[in-house]
Amino acid sequence: MEITGIFTAIIIGLVIGVLGRLVLPGRQSIALWLTMLIGVVAALLGTFVAGAFNVANTGGVDWLELLFQIGFAALGVALVAPIASRSNVD
């Protein structure tokens, strides 16, 4: 993987992570780096699942792939936020 691919994954992960946080109601008190990490993992999982359902390569914007990615990011934030906020209180 080239350096541009790493930067692209980080930027896309940040955007996907933030979109995942926006989908969830309320405030999630997790760090930006954790949001970005969840977003990168969600982007990879969403791309994999979209490929498995054969909807990853369409003629335009891959809306279903994006929905998978945002859904995984929201799920990741929902799972991690209680753990991260509990560790911040201690």
Image (cartoon, grey):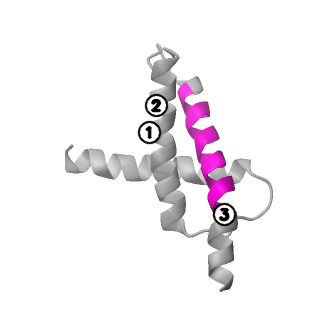
| Residue that carries the numbered disc 2 in the rendered image | 47
Callout count:
3
* Magenta highlight range: 65-81
82 above or below 16? below
Looking at the image, which is closer to me, 77 or 16?
77
| Residue that carries the numbered disc 3 in the rendered image | 81
Sequence-first disc among 1 and 3: 1
Query: In terms of secondary structure, where does tag 1 sit?
Result: helix
The residue under the point 64% across, 39% down is 71
The residue under the point 59% across, 41% down is 72
Question: Is the residue under label 1 in contact with that under label 2 (CB below 8 Å)?
Answer: yes
| Residue 38 placement, left or right of 24 | left
Q: Could you say where residue 10 lies in the image, as x and y percent from the top left?
A: 39, 53
Q: Where the N terminus falls, by quadrant?
A: top left
| Residue that carries the numbered disc 1 in the rendered image | 44
Question: Is the residue under label 3 in contact with that under label 2 (CB below 8 Å)?
Answer: no
Query: In terms of secondary structure, where does tag 3 sit?
Result: helix
Q: For the residue carrying disc 3, how many other residues have a C-alpha within 10 Å: few (<14), some (14-19), or many (20+)?
A: some
Identity, as a three-letter code, of the amino acid under mark 3: Ala
Q: Could you say where residue 11 lies in the image, as x and y percent from the top left?
A: 42, 51
Identity, as a three-letter code, of the amino acid under mark 1: Leu
Q: For the residue carrying disc 2, how many other residues have a C-alpha within 10 Å: few (<14), some (14-19), or many (20+)?
A: many
